[in-house]
Amino acid sequence: MLMLFASLVSGACNSYDDKDDNGGNAAYTETSQSEVPAWQIDWSNNQDCPNWTEPDASLYENWTILKVQIEEALQPFISSGDLMALFVNGELRGLAKPAVAIGGSQTVTGKFLMKAYGNETVTETVNMSLQYYNQTLQHIFTLTEDISLNTDATTGIDEDFIPEFTYGSAKYPVMSKLTVEPILTKVGLTPVSGNMVAAFVGEECRGTVSLSTSGNTQLLIFGRNTGESFTLKYYDAAAGKLYTILDAVKM
């Protein structure tokens, strides 16, 4: 579920020109910080390893090859205990563990190579649910989309297939986007490309981005529930300052 903030600035920042009792800006707090913040989303969850089993190849008329590459955000957490499963209408059609590096090394790569079984015709498109269990995070990520499964085509072989599993997080099922620069400008801060912005719910980071040169930087925020309130933090590297925008915004 992806929700867009259409009128976020006007709706949530109506008091940003106010001053506090000491003549400062009441819209944000300011602290000195020389080091770049190590902001990142905590993807760890508490889901048990699923009891997935290999499909019976004798039940299907054909199969195709599917190679899935794990996105960059989840690469640091890959392990040999990970699993990748493909479902069609709730039926498991393919199962794989991560590949290992070639040349005798047992280093686990971020690639999963599997046979996807089916009885569909060459031209038939099916609704596919791709589920990724990450053992380190104890998290099952799910991605659903339409894909053709037939013997005349492969997926992820001639070109990379990198699903955005973070968009199918069981821990953060609600997602929101906002444009950062107008909010910073409204409170009196100067957006500078390369500086970092993050969204927080309490002390938990829910999304971070570096400002682009376009002046239209999109911050993707991951939420647990609709209606959660979050605050924004902005790090100015040149000034060595961390700004926390006080007005909470709801998802």
Image (cartoon, rainbow, N blue to C red):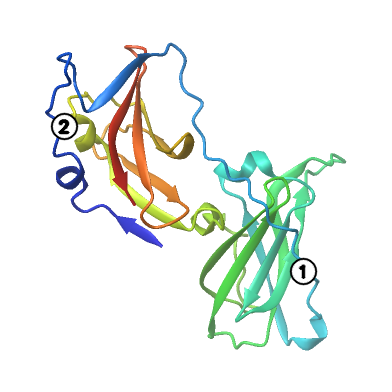
Q: Name the residue furthest front.
A: 21
Q: Considering depth in this image, is 11 or 221 the residue closer to the camera?
A: 11
| Dot 2 and dot 1 residues touching (CB under 8 Å) | no
Callout 1 secondary element: loop
Find disc 2 in the rendering and name its residue: 16
Residue on which the image places disc 1: 52
Percent coordinates x, y for residue 70 in the rendering:
61, 50
Which quadrant of the figure contains the N terminus? bottom left
Query: Where does residue 134 sit, x and y in percent of width and height?
Result: 69, 52
Q: Is residue 121 left or right of residue 97?
A: left
Q: Is residue 84 above or below residue 36?
A: below
Q: Nearer the viewer, mark 2 or mark 1?
A: 2
Compared to residue 85, the image places residue 74 above or below, namely above
Label ID, residue 68: none
For the residue carrying disc 2, how many other residues have a C-alpha within 10 Å: few (<14), some (14-19), or many (20+)? many
Q: Please tell me whether mark 2 sits on a helix, a strand or a loop.
A: loop
Give percent across and percent down for residue 223: 44, 51
Question: Residue drawn at (57%, 54%), measured in percent from left and top?
Answer: 160
Q: In this picture, is 129 found above or below 79?
A: below
* Mark 2 or mark 1, earlier in chain: 2
Quarter-wise, where is residue 244 in the image? top left
Residue at 63% x, 45% y is: 44
The three-letter amino acid code for the residue at tag 1 is Trp
Disc 2 marks a residue whose amino acid type is Tyr
Which corner quadrant of the image does residue 189 belong to?
Answer: top left
Q: Residue at x 63, y 64 (%)?
A: 131
Tell me the distance, in whole angstroms, between the alpha carbons under discs 2 and 1: 53 Å
